[in-house]
Image (spheres, rainbow, N blue to C red):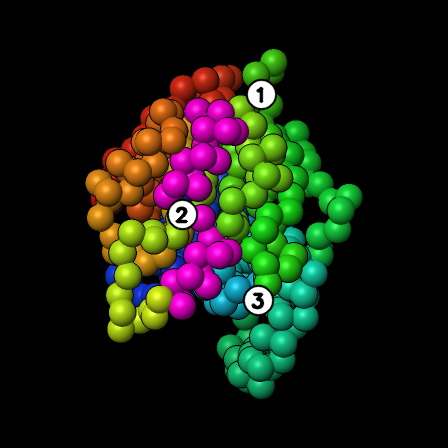
Amino acid sequence: MNRLVLLGTGCPAPSHKRFGPSTLIEINGERYLFDTGSGVTQRLNELGLKSSDIDLVFITHIHSDHIVDLYQLYISGWHQGRNKPFKIIGPVGIKHFFTKQLESYFDELKLRKEYEMRPNEVGLDYEIIEIDDDFKFANKNLSIKPFYVDHAPVNPAYGFKINLKKNKTEKSIVISGDTKKSENLIKEALNSDILVHELFVDLEMDEKRMTLETVKNVSKYHTTPKDVGDIASQSNTKNLVLTHFVPPNFDEEKVLSEIKQYYEGNIYIGYDLFTIEIWGYDNIFDEFFIKENNK
């Protein structure tokens, strides 16, 4: 199966419709997860997948809404029979964060292991790679390259470029991570087939949750509809898929209307479990089918 799935399209504000940010790419039976927002294991379950089915986890940056369920993914994968180490690739600092999580659960996990006597402990092993300037992941199905985006004061913060090749056909997916308008992102997304991009909806504001100063500050390190339209246009991406909406509830028509002033390509307002299925084992990405389920 070859597909891209938005597992969660929300933000730190809880929403029963939009869980925390997370994106799944599944290529020829290999499953790559980008960020582990709140509810990621539940959304995997809705797809018929287990936490133990994930081969590799990529983290864009160390913000709570992107990593809050990292331990849940780790421990539930062991409960579901993972028999290989849990693998994480992320920014400098992710090793410290995850080992601190393990320390906080040490006594609980020790008791569970001693009492439950599960058949393997290999699934509790873990491997963490912290990204440097030379990092690139590649195998026969795809390559994944991180690139810097601008989410200051959170630093480093990364987007990811996923290149796929089948026979002589090459296609690309770019995941923005969290960023304001970034020239580096535009460069990496140039002529991409899909750009998955975050969105800060500056058209609406809940004064009980955000002051004008808060809106101003948050907007400085996220991307507005106008900026998203500019990025999609300048990068000449074929398909713009929007996700990680701040706030989670907004006027979709207003957002589309504003973006369309700057970008003439295909625009999709993502939702949890929004799926792009890739038809044809021999013609990866030759044709897209947008699966309108679970809307």
- Which of disc 1 and disc 2 is earlier in sequence? 1
Residue under the image location 36 percent in, 56 percent down = 246
Q: Secondary structure at mark 1?
A: strand
State the mark number for residue 119.
3
Q: Closer to the camera: disc 2 or disc 1?
A: 2
Q: Closer to the camera: disc 3 or disc 1?
A: 1
- Which of disc 1 and disc 3 is earlier in sequence? 3
Q: Amino acid at mark 1?
A: Glu
Note whether 245 is above or below 146 in the view shown.
below
> Where does label 2 land, which residue?
224
| 122 inside magenta stretch | no
Q: Amino acid at mark 2?
A: Thr
Disc 2 and disc 3: Cα gap in Å?
Answer: 50 Å
Mark 3 crowd level (few <14, some 14–19, many ≥20, 10 Å Cα): few
Residue 270: image quadrant is: top left
Disc 3 and disc 1: Cα gap in Å?
Answer: 42 Å
- Which of disc 3 and disc 2 is earlier in sequence? 3
Q: x, y percentage for residue 135?
A: 74, 45
Residue 148 visible in the shown view: yes
Magenta stretch: give its range: 213-238
Image quadrant occupied by the N terminus: top left
Q: Are marks 3 and 1 in contact (CB under 8 Å)?
A: no
Q: Secondary structure at mark 3?
A: loop
Image quadrant occupied by the C terminus: top left
Dominant secondary structure, magenta:
helix
State the mark number for residue 19.
none
State the mark number for residue 170.
1
Q: x, y percentage for residue 141?
A: 61, 30
